[in-house]
Amino acid sequence: RLRDFMLQSDFRDQLGATGKVVLPAIHVLNETLTKSNIEILIESGAHGCFLINHDFKAALMLPIIVQMRKLFPELWMGVNFLGIDAKCAFDMLGKLDKSACHIDAYWADDAQIIEAYTEQHAAAQISKVRELSGWKGLYFGGTAFKYRRTVSPDDYSAVARVAAEHMDVVTTSGPSTGEAATPSKIAAFRSGLGQQALAIASGITPDNAPLYKDADCFIVATGINRPGNFYEIDPARLSRLVEVARVL
């Protein structure tokens, strides 16, 4: 493991959160819309964001990332690079760091954790390339994540416990985009993680957020976007989620 466990309290402190951390996931199309979404989330009191290249290759998002960092130098900003493996992602992050464009977090949908294995060779290789990249941000690793290898509910606690050794923020989801995890899944993850930080990355809304007190972070898009709109944050929905999360 590269570093000490990212404790829940340390994670909240780093993000400046009094309750749950709220991180909108922005599906990037262009600079103008990304800038508008970031302005909305800052106004709402959200703690940062993740930028995602849903519609084009990861490399094509790099100029937008650099521009957003210039426009918002204090923003806590993470990325989810779709379509590339961890080695390429950490190489990109290391190069961005060297060009004075620091990214605060990397979220991977699949951290390659297999609870039945004694040795986590794939996850260990990810840790190695992360270290070699020189990048110092937080690693959010997808575990029992949507559209990936199915994990039995009986193994949720075990897979979380294994994952804790290989990432900063263990990150799980419901079965599909916009679909919430069962509260029992999140409770099992909490049991396996102890005091380590846990994020949920699907299905959170202002209405159901109180069911997920075992999590520390809500990564959210569908639940705070304009209805039927994949790309634009609804200011009212996001502000309401931030208000709810602040007291959880």
Image (cartoon, grey):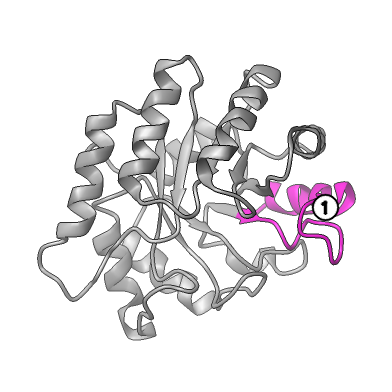
Viewer-side residue, 194 vs 231: 231
In this orientation, does residue 143 appear? yes
Which residue lies at the image location 38% right of the left edge and 81% below the top edge?
150
Left or right for 151, reference 55: left
Q: Residue 216: x percent and y percent?
A: 52, 52
Which residue lies at the image location 83% right of the left edge and 60% below the top edge?
229
The span shown in magenta is 219-248
Which residue lies at the image location 43% right of the left edge and 36% below the top edge?
10
Where is 235 relative to 144, above or below?
A: above
Which residue lies at the image location 49% right of the left edge and 78% below the top edge?
184
Q: Which residue is mark 1?
A: 240
In this orientation, does residue 6 appear? no
Where is 54 relative to 209, above or below?
A: above
Left or right for 45, reference 132: right
Q: Which amino acid type corresponds to the residue marked 1 in the rendered image? A: Arg
Viewer-side residue, 159 vs 25: 25
Q: Quadrant of residue 90?
A: top left
**Callout 1 secondary element:** helix
Quadrant in which the N terminus appears:
top left
Q: Residue 167: x percent and y percent?
A: 32, 48
Residue 235 belongs to the span the image colors magenta: yes
Residue 44 belongs to the span the image colors magenta: no
Q: Quadrant of residue 74?
A: top right
Q: Residue 147: x percent and y percent?
A: 48, 74
Residue positioned most to the right: 236
